Image (cartoon, coloured by chain):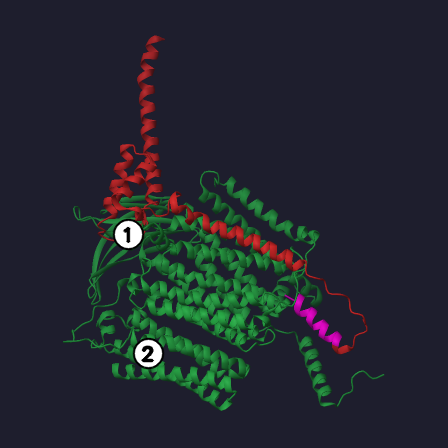
Chain colours: A red, B green
Amino acid sequence: MLRNRELLHPIQVLGIAVLAIAFMGADVDARFNKLGHQLMCMCGCNQVLLECNHVGCAYSERMRNELTASLERGDNDSLALQSFVQKYGNTVLSAPTSSGFNIVAWIMPFAVFAAASALTLWLVRLWKSRPVAQPVAHPNLGSDELDALRKKARQETEF
Amino acid sequence: MPQIGSFTLLLALALAVYSFVAGALALHRKDDRLGETARRAGIACWAAVTIAAFALVLAAFGNDFSVAYILHHSNRDLPIAYKFAALWSGQEGSLLLWAWLLSTYGLVMRLRYKVDPQLTAYASAIVAAVQVFFLLLINFAAHPFGLVTGSIPPDGNGLNPLLQYPEMVIHPPMLYLGYVGVTAPFAFALGALIMKYPGEKWIHITRRWTMVAWLFLTCGVFLGAHWAYAVLGWGGYWGWDPVENASILPWLTMTAFLHSVMMQEKRGMMKMWNMWLIFTTFLLAIFGTFLTRSGVVSSVHAFAQSGIGIWFVWFLAIAFATCVFFFVRNRETLKSEHRLDSLISRESSFLFNNLVLLVACFAVLWGTLFPVLSEWVTGSKVTVGPPFFNRVNVPIGLFLLFLTGIGPLLAWRQTSWDSLRRNFLWPTIVGVVTAVVLIARGMKPWQDSAYFYSLMAISLSALVATTIFGEFWRGGRVIARQQHISIPSGMVQITRRNTRRYGGYLVHFGVILIVIGFAGLPFNQDKEQELGFGDKMQIGNYTLVCQSYTQDDTPNYSSEWAVLDVYKNGKKIDTMYPERRFYKASEQTSTIVANRSRPNEDLYLVYTGKNPDTGRPIIKAHVNPLVMWIWIGVIVVGFGTVLALIPNWKPPKVRAVEKAREETEAAVKRGTVEVGGD
């Protein structure tokens, strides 16, 4: 029994190590893909780093290698991105951060949406509350008037 | 040729100035004869700009490198089609194309003046004012016939390789037809406001103009997307580049206008709103040009940048001030005739549709200009790229898709809850079943927000498609009962009887197909690998085997390409040839993508170059699901728009009744028939 345990131990360790390496590799790939889409290529092409396809681009290959090295070092996402910001400046990030003035970029579209929705609802209520037209005093209309009303009704409801 | 071109451009400017000044004076003095001379000057202006455009094209065909523009955008070995495309491949030429298209729209307007002589006279003067701006620009800031100083080189610098693709021959003119086409409804709207035009006739007159401009802009935007997909070789079709964004800004407001204008036509509501929508669309079209030309934001379309941005700023300021002035002066004529009867009505769905479209427009504009704002406020520039636009615009787009589904189910004025429940039942069931099936087949929306949005997009598309089919079905069934014909025949007939409504539904259906194409985006795969002879690459269900790689040489370019056999499930299904070209005149390289497009997915191969150490080609492969549906959707949108432009067909009985009614009315007017009687 003890012997068995002694034999199993290295197999378990090996198994765990293989799984860890495999999953770590998969994780690094996924993180590389995720972070590579959060960075811009700095060659001036205005493309996301992983989408820069310039033949012989002087930046993208180097930047991809830097990202790989950062992930292999064990840097977390924030640290990896921060190292790029320090080296290349704020414009290396493909979207504004959610801190400082940059947060305005994220808030504003939804704030405008909320404000416009509130305005529209208010407008609808206002229009609804306008006085309703009173019934006409003399319902006996001439044929021309009736024709005109039918035409208007058709126009307003046909679509 | 350059002398003829220069002279005719100056002549065109003089004619446009005359057309504007004389036209405005004639309207002020109510002098019809002077107005007629202004109209004719406008027509002559078209002739002059046409001659100038021809002169530039002929200079390109004749390899006249004494013209600086031709020297910089053409070369002797450039194929004929691309020499023609050289007209819009650079700043000066594209502005000339803009001026020509504008004068062509002006020509059509001035020839069809009898539709409404007074309103057309106003619109013609406004178009002439816009023409004056562009012709001033061409004559004094971006002259296409500028001559080369010193000795004339024997050959030109050639056309930008990225532009040497068949779609580039039609994409810019389409886009410009859309941008420029906005001027016509703008001119009619402003004219109607200035003359305090009663009623909705100006809306009827401009509806076709607006739809035509919208169609061209739609085609232009998506041709640009297809060009990016087929040429740029990054595996995508939309990069949220500022210039791309600039093209959808007026598209969004024009789409809003095409919807809200129905409220004005039907109920006499939203007159001020519609007026401002069309003003905004025009201003955004000009603003887009400013963004493209000024370099105020960095863009991949940097080849179009120059220092003429300030001209556009001034023009925008003047145009905006003019709109505000006349709006403030004459806004009394734009009062709404009706009230809104219910929140659950077609009117309120249009209101919310407009709201969402405008918020989307704002979000795109905001993201495009935020780098400038950030630099101004904090002194530090930031990048606003695809992650921002996707995160902000996708939820907005999904909400709009939802409204597209419920809008047609609502009646004008008021809809009862019962009717809404009845009409909504099947579309909701179809939408929910679609979501369940997708999850059962392996889509995991809880894993990533992109998967969630994709699931929502496809489910909502199914919901909207069901509502559209329901509309055709219900209409077809009524006709089928009346005329004892089959329901499909009834559906065809109801479409012919109300082309605008059912053409609109087809446009919505096309939009659904486009959304389905977008929904495949989160499932894209890509892989890059060096491939020698016989080497294999596995991506998705495909195995690529490199059979060979070779070279070719033409007078215009030399090329390298790989021959790759494609296997799926062990069976050879195709051979593909991704290519890389080196253009001799411009000394630039470009990729020619090999794309195997199928309804379920595209296999998209790019020859990215050779490894300098091993000499072996590097192939980048992408598997992009559902992309084909985007292009099919655009074709359906185009078909629906054309259908909506066709006048309604009337059955013989209806025509006979209408004819009898018209004859009776005419007789009553003549006094030969007595109305009423015993």
Q: Nearer the viewer, residue B532 or B82?
A: B82
Coordinates of residue B510 in the picture (x, y in percent): 50, 59
Q: Amino acid at mark 2?
A: Ala
At label 1, counting other C-alpha atoms closer than 10 Å, the crowd grade (few under 14, some 14-19, many 20 or more) is many
B416 in relation to B285, above or below: above
Span of residues in magenta = A145-159
Residue at which label 1 appears: A53
Coordinates of residue B299 in the picture (x, y in percent): 32, 58
Q: Are marks 1 and 2 in contact (CB under 8 Å)?
A: no
Q: Nearer the viewer, residue B485 or A74?
A: A74
Q: Nearer the viewer, residue B213 or B635?
A: B213
Disc number placed over residue B53 in the picture, else none? 2
Write the residue at 25% across / 81% down.
B2
Q: Is residue B571 visible?
A: no
At label 2, counting other C-alpha atoms closer than 10 Å, the crowd grade (few under 14, some 14-19, many 20 or more) is many
Write the residue at 71% across / 83% down.
B665
| Subunit that carries the residue with mark 1 | A
Q: Is residue B417 left or right of residue B283?
A: right
Real-space Cα separation, disc 1 to disc 2, in angstroms: 36 Å
Coordinates of residue B114 in the picture (x, y in percent): 53, 84
Q: Label 2, secondary structure: give it.
A: helix
Task: Answer whether residue B274 is magenta in the image.
Answer: no
Coordinates of residue B490 in the picture (x, y in percent): 64, 65
Query: Is most of the magenta stretch helix, strand or loop?
Result: helix
The C terminus of chain B is located in which quarter? Answer: bottom right
